[in-house]
Image (cartoon, helix red, strand yellow):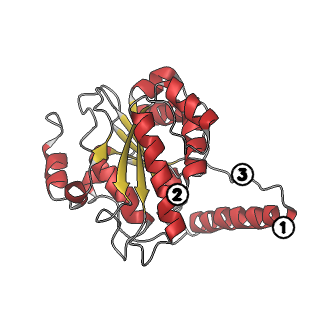
Amino acid sequence: MNNAPSNIKKYISKSPETEKWQLSGNSYGYIDKVVVIPALAESVSLLKTLASLAENEQTQLNSTLVICVVNNRCPSISSKEEIEDNGITLDYLLHLSSGMDPPSTCPGPVYFKKVNESGMKIAFVDASTESRELPAKGGVGIARKIGMDLALGRLDYDSDGPVLIICLDADTLVDRNYLKEIGEYFNDHNDAAAVVAFSHILPDDEASRAAAIAYELFLRYYETGLRFANSPYAFQTIGSTMVCRADAYAAVGGMNRKRGGE
């Protein structure tokens, strides 16, 4: 944190998220990329997402920290099942971040082993247990904000390359060149932020498959319409596709706290 620019230090000092919530996990050196993943009752799918990240090049994993924000709102809003599932997630994340064997409750030992053996750097935020829950009016926006704000204090701002915050979801799989391609894009472009190309995984069930295709066509048609209208906002607004430079994130006041409106 000592090498952070003054504007980032100022932003962190004013962030209520960095006061209420903390990162758990080992302290890591030289991190130029942080991947932030909110998770709500996604113990199984999160492991699959982490396993897909683990297939990226070792050189990329060595300089990347993955922050999982395990979150729910208070028991009167979130269900008992959601909170219990989050407990399972917190348990195996503790084991993963410490390099331990999987706990007996781990829902995917094969994926756990793959992540553990990759040497992936993992930290997590407990925004689930009593007194640590999200506020009643919070949603995935504040969960992302917690992870992104806390990421600012773990990045190495003396890096020769871009210092990035990457957003992902707990049910999202990535390609083996995911981290490399993101880094190379920002090496070649002076953009403050970017959107990663995406496609939905199509279900086997015919009705669900048709619905997924229709939804994705809608998303792409919407963006195309904005381009046709010469809108400066002609890009997808899907949280799991967002990437930005750390200094740009602080400059715009960070992530908003709104619930998803996709």
Per the image, label 1 sits on a secondary structure element best described as helix
Q: Which mark is residue 198?
A: none
Q: Which mark is residue 201?
A: 3
Q: Which residue is mark 1?
A: 207
Q: CA distance from mark 2 to mark 1?
A: 28 Å
Q: Indicate the position of residue 207 as horizontal and vertical percent values.
A: 84, 67
Q: Amino acid at mark 1?
A: Ala
Q: Residue at x 60, y 36 (%)?
A: 109
Q: Which residue is mark 2?
A: 85
Determine if residue 65 is in view: no
The answer to which of marks 2 and 3 sits earlier in the sequence is 2
Q: Residue at x 31, y 43 (%)?
A: 24
* Mark nearer the viewer, 2 or 3: 2
Per the image, label 2 sits on a secondary structure element best described as helix
Rendered position, 43 above or below 179: below
Other-residue count near label 2 (Cα within 10 Å), few / some / many at <14 / 14–19 / ≥20: some
Q: Left or right? Give the position of 96 relative to 108.
A: left
The answer to which of marks 3 and 1 sits earlier in the sequence is 3
